[in-house]
Amino acid sequence: MADYTLGNNLRIQGGGHPSGWQRDSQGPTTFEAAVARQFDELEELLIRKHLNYGPKNILASPGSPLMGLRVRIWDKLARINHMLDHNVDDQVGESLLETFGDLANYAIIARLVIRDE
């Protein structure tokens, strides 16, 4: 069985446990558990930011909600590209991890908009 260590506290073991949710002292031990942890973190981030921005932030975007999301996604991608291409450290208190989290959450918001939810 393969055993991979990713980052400081994440171990993925190949083969997986039948339940798909086994954890050990080093963190999640299956891909499924690692993904579930990411979704939990993204959900918390999305809800916290929604509380700060409110529902009209996207719905009242100039042009349309999807145009507003498109601009936000473009800004995040530009930030990621600049930081990675030029080896620039964070200057505004938003890590690459949070930036990628924002991208994932913008995709979720876009799905909600498209479905009229």
Image (cartoon, helix red, strand yellow):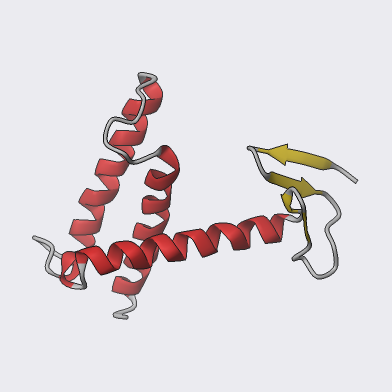
Percent position of residue 46, x then y:
37, 63
Q: Residue furthest front?
A: 25
Kindly identify the residue that appears in the image at 83 percent across and 58 percent down.
Answer: 16
Residue furthest bottom in the image? 117
On the rendered structure, is 66 left or right of 43? left
Indicate the position of residue 66 as horizontal and vertical percent values: 23, 62
Q: Quadrant of residue 116?
A: bottom left
Q: Position of residue 19 (x, y in %)?
A: 80, 70
For the residue pair 53 and 1, the one nearer the viewer reads as 53
Q: Quadrant of residue 59?
A: bottom left
Q: Could you tell whether 65 is left or right of 87 in the image?
A: left
Query: 113 or 29: nearer the eye?
Result: 29
Residue, x 30% and y 61% (percent of image)? 49
Tell me which residue sits at (36%, 34%) in the image: 80
Q: Position of residue 43 (x, y in %)?
A: 45, 66
Q: Residue at x 23, y 64 (%)?
A: 52
Number of labels in the image equals 0
Image quarter in which the C terminus is found: bottom left
**In the image, is residue 38 above or below residue 12?**
below
Q: Is residue 43 above or below residue 78?
A: below
Most extreme residue toward the right is 1
